[in-house]
Image (spheres, rainbow, N blue to C red):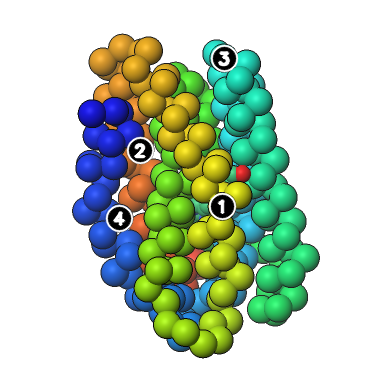
């Protein structure tokens, strides 16, 4: 069994919970209330910017120059998607600016950035893998199960169910498997832990958007 096969088994229950979430089922049938999508979109714009920076940092720390290139490209891809959000979705869905990072997004991006900066680079690669792989699986799942007809969220679905994204996802999985095979048992275990943690944070990101969870005002 490759590391990625093993790691996916570990998060399968989290993935099953994700595809059963109201955010996902309502996105799929087009009934997700617009305010929840706007909240998600604004947070995801902030997420993608930090995620892009984390990917570039992992690229800078990768041992193999092919992996440096791959992660720099992933980082570029994330920032390009962020800009596309700004130029189209923000207009289409009436989002003004991304505003501040709310708790779930804040927690997730800072987990990714600190892991990218300070953990062994293999662990950092594993921490960002759910961002690729879960989105691909969710995009494909929605694409396969959606009903015919107009869905206001179709373009979102197409982004993650598309072949361009699939190529990046396969590449990220292959890199993780190669570095996992070359490292120690203890680093490999930390890779799996990071993969599970990030998967939980993916769940939280959608759940918090559905519930519109913001910082509580204090004082
Ligand atoms: C929270 C989150 N995770 C992963 C992706 C896919 O890049 C995204 N756009 N947003
Ligand atoms: C994972 C990911 N999400 C949006 S862009 C990107 C990197 C692939 O280009």
Which residue has dot 1 on it? Answer: 163
> Residue shown at 66%/31% (left/top)?
72
Which residue has dot 3 on it? Answer: 64
Image: 33 above or below 179: below
Q: Earlier in the sequence, mark 4 or mark 3?
A: 4
State the mark number for residue 195: 2
Residue 187 image offset from top left, x and y in percent = 33, 18
* Camera sees residue 171: yes
- Distance (Cα) linking label 1 and label 4: 21 Å
Residue 26 image offset from top left, x and y in percent = 41, 79
- Distance (Cα) linking label 3 and label 2: 21 Å
* Camera sees residue 114: no
State the mark number for residue 125: none
Q: Quick check: 168 left or right of 5?
A: right
* Number of numbered discs: 4
Q: Are marks 4 and 3 in contact (CB under 8 Å)?
A: no
State the residue in front, 20 or 161: 161
State the mark number for residue 15: 4
Q: Earlier in the sequence, mark 1 or mark 4?
A: 4
Local packing at callout 3 (Cα closer than 10 Å; few below 14, some 14-19, many 20+) is: few
Labels 3, 2: front one: 3
Q: Earlier in the sequence, mark 3 or mark 1?
A: 3
State the residue in front, 204 or 175: 175
């Amino acid at each position: 069994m490759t590391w990625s096969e093993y790691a996916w088994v570990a998060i399968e229950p989290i993935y099953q919970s994700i595809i059963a979430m109201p955010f996902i089922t309502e996105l799929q049938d087009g009934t997700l209330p617009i305010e929840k999508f706007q909240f998600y979109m604004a947070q995801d714009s902030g997420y993608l910017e930090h995620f892009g920076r984390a990917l570039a940092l992992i690229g800078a720390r990768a041992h193999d120059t092919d992996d440096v290139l791959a992660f720099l490209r992933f980082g570029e891809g994330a920032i390009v998607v962020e800009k596309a959000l700004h130029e189209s979705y923000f207009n289409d869905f009436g989002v003004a600016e991304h505003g501040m990072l709310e708790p779930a997004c804040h927690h997730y991006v800072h987990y990714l950035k600190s892991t990218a900066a300070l953990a062994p680079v293999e662990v950092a690669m594993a921490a960002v893998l759910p961002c690729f792989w879960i989105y691909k699986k969710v995009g494909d799942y929605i694409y396969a199960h959606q009903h015919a007809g107009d869905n206001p969220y179709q373009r979102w679905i197409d982004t993650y169910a598309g072949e361009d994204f699939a190529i990046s996802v396969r590449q990220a999985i292959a890199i993780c498997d190669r570095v996992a095979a070359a490292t120690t048992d203890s680093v490999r275990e930390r890779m799996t832990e990071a993969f599970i943690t990030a998967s939980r944070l993916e769940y939280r990101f959608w759940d918090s958007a559905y519930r519109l969870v913001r910082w509580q005002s204090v004082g």
